[in-house]
Image: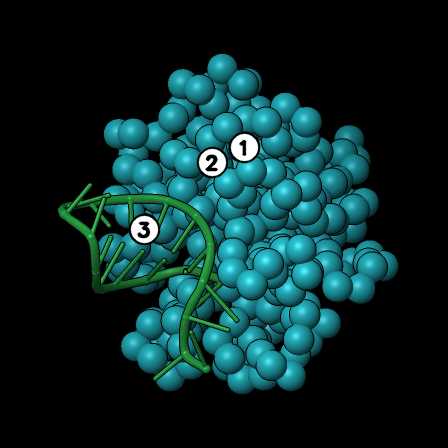
Amino acid sequence: MKIATWNVNSLKVRLPHVLQWLEANPVDALCLQETKTVDEKFPSAEIAAAGYQSVYTGQKTYNGVAILSRHPMQDIVRNNPLFPDASQRIIAATIEGMRIVCAYVPNGQTVGSEKYQYKLAWLDAFHAWLKSEIALHPNVAVLGDYNIAPADCDVHDPVAWQGQVLVSDLERAAFQRLCELELADAFRLFPQPDKIYSWWDYRQLAFRRNMGLRIDHILLTPSLAARCTACVVDKLPRKWEQPSDHAPVVAEFLQAAE
DNA sequence: ATGGCCTCGGTTCGAGGA
């Protein structure tokens, strides 16, 4: 079993990349963020032709999330029932006994701004809802763009970024509280090379200079962490023409014991 | 340099992202 997450920054623009990536990486489930696509225009036929079912919740211009799966999906939940919100940022489905939560955490804009307060409130409510999902489902994987770099080793220049949005103490504390639900950062279950990131600014030749942040994550309940055999960032699509500013993150699992 | 790029909506610029 392989699962992945990718902020595509417009599915309309990136659909060819998604299809190309799935052909080379036939994961069981792929979580997408920032589809920026209303449901009526979701490219489910093109995705079905590649062998994937889709569930999604989108809106015009901003946000939007989807799960693509090679297997049937059950118990679809859209958004957080504990947090009324016009932004389409969460979709969840059960796939092959795995509860897959796909999330696009708010960006926060600047520390102290209204959007920053919204991000913190959103994360509080996300924590409360995940707690109930974990109580309901034995195997939960929470994939997405968290817009938080959990530690300084996830930041190319921690001094320059100190206190900024995406790395601030309150955001990191919120991430830590999610981990205290007994969710493990799959990437950190394994020895990793230094300076691995999942997002690079479009400006300043940031990708070429590896000026990035690791803000896309896969969190796992203990049952899944025990079965996880690898977690990697696939930088390759970031090198393609007209790329998303994010790269996919992939986790691989042993099958559950019979 | 409070910059730089990309996407969207809707027109050639502003908002939002991270």
Rounded to the nearest angstrom, the CA distance separating label 3 from label 2 is 15 Å
The residue wearing badge 1 is A17
The residue wearing badge 3 is A62
Residue A173 vertical placement versus A254 (above, below): below
Q: Which residue is found at the position 51% from the left and 60% from the top?
A: A203
The answer to whether marks 2 and 1 mark residues whose Cβ atoms lie closer than 8 Å is yes
**Residue A74 appears in the figure:** no
The secondary element bearing badge 2 is classed as helix
The secondary element bearing badge 3 is classed as loop
Chain under disc 3: A
Label 3 sits on what residue type?
Tyr
Label 1 sits on what residue type?
His
Chain under disc 1: A
In-front residue for pair A24/A202: A202
The residue wearing badge 2 is A14
Q: Badge 1: how crowded within 10 Å, few (<14), some, or many (20+)?
A: some
Q: Is residue A36 left or right of residue A252?
A: left
In the displayed orientation, state which residue is furthest to the top. A49
In-front residue for pair A29/A152: A152
